[in-house]
Amino acid sequence: MTKYPTPAGGASLLLSFRLQKHTVIIVGSNTLAASRAFAALEADSSVVVVANGGLNSACEELQWRANNGQLEVLELDRLPCSVEGAVDRDAQALNDYLGSVGHVRLVCVTDTLLSGVSGSRRSRTSAQLIAHACSLRNIPLNVCDMPDLCDFSFLSTHRFQNHEAGAPSSLQIGVTTNGQGCRLASRIRRDIVATLPKDVGAAVANVSKLRSMAKASVDGVDDVVDAELNEEAGPSTPNRPVAQRRADESAGESARRRMKWVAQVSEYWPFPKLAKLTPEDMSSVLDGQSGYLAASPPSNSDRPSSQDVPTLHHLSLSPLRQGRIFLVGSGPGHPSLLTVATRDALTKHADLVLSDKLVPAAVLAIIPSHVEVRIARKFPGNADYGQAELMEAAIEAAIRGLTVVRLKQGDPSVYGRAGEEILYFRERGYEPIVVPGVSSVLAGPTFAGIPVTQRGAAESFIVCTGVGRGGKQVQLPGYVRSRTLVILMGVARLQEMLNTLLAESSEPATRRDGAAFPACTPMAIVERASMPDQRAIFSTIRDIVIALESGGEQRPPGMIVVGWSILSLWGKGDVSVLEPGASEHDEKRIQTWLGGQRWRIVDGLENGWADL
């Protein structure tokens, strides 16, 4: 089987250039040149426009920018030329000019379409000579409408604005079809922009401030720690296990943990909540004291009046309203999988919603605007603190006579710590109403095309967690060919669990109850099940780690499925794995399933779900 994915040519290496203190040369002075100049100026570069006729031939925008000192326009036909009677004076003069100017990062030729008001176009021969000159000086070149001469191309881009301040933000997106449909690229870019909330630019700005605060809060951090605070240098998942927070942490340890929390906020919190972060909110995220953050608080007019909320000095002739607590499951993520009871609790009964961080924004969006929402800050190393804060908040609100909805992902009783909350609330005089949700144990594999049971492939299934209480290791089930194993909250400890599943002897095997798993056993990781950006990674126990690492940035939350039911419905299906002697053909069965590769990655949902 192929060890790694085979590269498929025809793509581009997408980069974002930082152009401070560098010069971009633009040849031509038409409206396209103005567009290229504006993009370069926004990247903080110095822009020099070189065109026959100079400023007088330039389009109106370039003339305005030149007159306002934003760029320089030079007359190409007046530049010095070192070769008298050169075959192409423009190309030779431009070559001489490039040699006299330092820090030229890029050259863009735009007058191959139309040069200024003269109506002339640069010939292909002239463009080729310019390309040769740039090549000799190792300067990347773009020639409009001549892709074979280009070292780089421009994406169809959009820069988001801060929706309140109106100023451009640091968030940009770009789309390219690699020359196979520029007009279509613009349409795709517009569609992507339309699907994102208007405040996403402000969300990026606030996360940037949060990152700066996380770093600036530690004085004298050494270079090693500072390097570790760089997000790109870290692991591809924000869920890598960490130790519980300690009171005696060093400055470096605290900085690492805070950056971990910033990563969690970036990954899980809805864009509108990030966009509304105040400096006080940011401090709350980083100080480790509060376990939740208020999100979209109701206005004063939406809050209960002072007559409705009793105080210690309040004397009422009517009975006080009895507060209630709902424990509800939000399902795996897709809003259409909410039960009617959960939707009613959120939209008709709730005064306060205490939400887990994993609940998607699409679910939170159905909550009426007058209902206060608080998002749990149960970050790595801080989960117990966050859990306690939420439970205390629920009791405090119930005492005030409010209806509290404790919103949990999936089914609250399947590794949702519902039992702890039930006992806590009961001890304080409140019997919570538990509303089941669709568990990801069943929904996640189903969305990935995996049945947890299937005649001829899996007669039973078993569910376990990848991490015990307080981050302790758990005992995993042993191998049973006719059984599907589903592991929740285990992706961050994947290698550790694989060692346990495969071990034949010594200490790892003691953490497994039963036989070792064959290395060729099918294994799948389903990330963000039921959401538009769902991803399913299919491989075997022996190759799943490299498959996950090769898939790029991880998309938590994720779940693990192990067993022969994984391939039972793929393509033409395979329900022969339980027949006598079937195990002798397992390697061939795996090759057929994966098409000779070591893994397969499937992005997105089935088309039908996009309309639900």
Image (cartoon, rainbow, N blue to C red):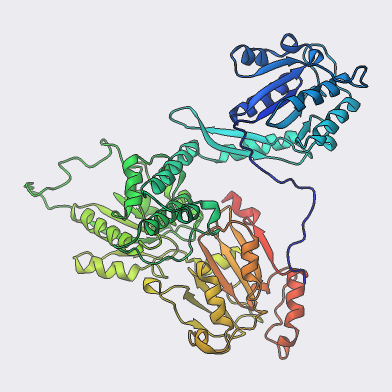
Task: Estimate the x, y position of residue 547 in percent, counting from the top left.
Answer: 65, 66
> Nearest the camera: 300 or 288?
288
Residue 49 vs residue 242: left or right?
right
Up/down of 67 relative to 356, above or below: above
Q: Which residue corresponds to the image point at 81% horizontal and 16% vertical from the top-left?
A: 80
Q: Which residue corresponds to the image point at 43% horizontal and 63% vertical from the top-left?
A: 437
Q: Which residue corresponds to the image point at 50% horizontal and 66% vertical from the top-left?
A: 440
Q: Can you name the residue that lies furthest to the top here?
A: 56
Task: Estimate the x, y position of residue 496 in percent, counting from the top left.
Answer: 52, 75
Q: Quadrant of residue 395?
A: bottom left
Q: Quadrant of residue 124?
A: top right
Residue 448 vs residue 30: left or right?
left
Up/down of 397 relative to 206, above or below: below
Up/down of 356 relative to 540, above or below: above
Q: Which residue corresponds to the image point at 49% horizontal and 53% vertical from the top-left?
A: 335
Residue 72 vs residue 91: left or right?
left
Task: Estimate the x, y position of residue 200 in percent, counting from the top left.
Answer: 49, 39
Task: Estimate the x, y position of residue 320 in percent, counting from the top left.
Answer: 14, 52
> Nearest the camera: 315 or 108?
108
Residue 95 vs residue 423: left or right?
right
- Which part of the image, by quadrant, shows the N terminus? bottom right
